[in-house]
Structures are given as C-alpha cells and as structure tokens.
Amino acid sequence: MWLFLRRRLIMWAVLAIAVPLLEWLLGKVSTALRERRGESTVTKGLDTARSGLRTLRGKGR
C-alpha cells in the first residue's frame, strides 16, 4: 500500500514542481541564447522541448 502511495506522491512532485521548473529554465536559456546569437537550431530545439513540457502538463499557452 505504501509503495503505491509513494509512487503517486513522487509522480505528483515531478509533475507539480520539476516539470514547470524545467519549462521555465528552458525558456530562460532559449531567450538568453536568442538575444546573444539570434535564432539557431539550438534555440529552436529548446523551444520544441519547452512545448513538449507544456503538452505534458496539459497547458497550451
């Protein structure tokens, strides 16, 4: 029983805390790189990863 509760708690923590934090971090890095060097493959990849995280969270902004 505790195993299932623990798994759910860990999954909740990942979805509630880590995913939004990672999405924010990817946005900051992408913006900083874009300001320094312009649009590149790296910034497009970071934006794609950020979009995937938004989909994972279930929020389309």
Image (tube, rainbow, N blue to C red):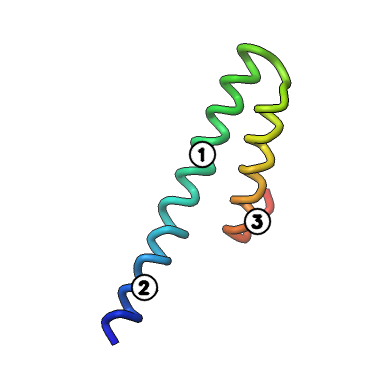
Cα–Cα gap, marks 3 and 1 = 14 Å
The numbered mark, 3 or 1, whose residue comes first in the sequence reads: 1
* Residue corresponding to mark 2: 7
Q: Nearer the viewer, residue 10 or 41?
A: 41
Mark 1 vs mark 2, foreground winner is 2
Where residue 32 appears, as percent x and y from the top left, is 57, 20
What whole-number distance in Å separates the C-alpha atoms at marks 3 and 2? 22 Å
What residue sits 70% from the left and 15% below the top?
38
Q: Earlier in the sequence, mark 1 or mark 2?
A: 2
Within-10-Å neighbours for mark 1: few <14, some 14–19, many 20+: some
Q: Which residue is mark 3?
A: 55
Local SS, label 3: helix
Check disc 3: other Cα within 10 Å, few if <14, some if 14-19, many if 20+: few
Q: Nearer the viewer, mark 3 or mark 2?
A: 2
Quadrant of the rendering where the N terminus is positioned:
bottom left
Residue 2 percent across, percent down from the top left:
26, 82
Q: Position of residue 3 (x, y in %)?
A: 30, 80
Label 3 is placed on what type of residue?
Answer: Thr
The answer to which of marks 3 and 2 sits earlier in the sequence is 2
Q: Secondary structure at mark 1?
A: helix
Tell which residue pokes out farthest to the bottom in this image. Answer: 1
Q: Which residue is mark 1?
A: 24
Q: Residue furthest top?
A: 36
User: What residue is rendered at 49% in x and 35% in y?
Assistant: 25
* Residue type for callout 1: Trp
Left or right of 2? Residue 17 is: right
Q: Quadrant of residue 45?
A: top right
Give the CA separation, mark 1 to mark 2: 25 Å
